[in-house]
Image: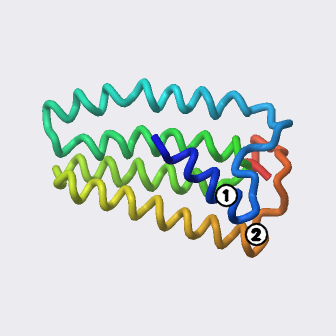
Amino acid sequence: MAIHPVATVICKLLGSAGKHNKGNPLGALAWASTLWLIFSLPLAYVVSLYRIEWFFPAMLLVIGGRYLTFSMLFGMRVYWLLGLSLAAAGYLLGKSLASPTVGAFVGASIEVAFAIFILLANRRGVRPNNSFKPNPLRGSA
């Protein structure tokens, strides 16, 4: 529950607004994808009642799907790679019946690695600007 507030504080400490541009026509997508995530939590819970080993894989699939929307929302294609990485990890962990500890560690490791990559890329100015100019053929600018 503290991910968004903590991330916003960290972004502000690092000199970023920590949110999408006000003119972004897809701003409502952030709220919609948050609701989708919350509505999916009972599914992960029910799956875990059947096999506890499937809780984190189910959550990685749900969270990975949500990151796919971030590419359009924030204009960064790296979110496609993050979402697909989390989904692939969720699938592989579920198929192998990895322990919940392994599932949690793998998911957290993927997110931390991408967070560091995105932070360093933004610090080096790899992201051209914060304007939102979607191009459906090439992804977001």
Helix, strand or loop status at disc 1: helix
The answer to whether 81 is drawn above or below residue 41 in the figure is below
- Could you tell whether 61 is left or right of 73 in the image? left
For the point 46% across and 32% down, the residue is 37
| Quadrant position of the N terminus in the picture | top left
* Dot 1 amino acid type: Cys
Q: Which kind of residue does numbered mark 2 sit on?
A: Val
In the rendering, which numbered label is found on residue 126? 2
What residue sits 54% from the left and 32% below the top?
Answer: 34
Circle 2: element type:
loop
Q: Earlier in the sequence, mark 1 or mark 2?
A: 1
Q: Is residue 111 above or below residue 138?
A: below
The x and y percentages for residue 120 are 65, 73
Q: In which quarter of the image is residue 73?
A: top right
Occupied quadrant, residue 44:
top left
The quadrant in which residue 123 appears is: bottom right
- Residue at position x 39%, y 28% from top? 40
Q: Is residue 35 left or right of residue 22?
A: left
| Residue matched to label 1 | 11
Residue 54 as seen in the image, left or right of residue 122: left
For mark 1, does the 10 Å Cα neighbourhood hold few (<14), some (14 to 19), or many (20 or more) residues?
Answer: some
Task: Please indicate whether residue 37 sits to the left or right of residue 120 in the image.
Answer: left
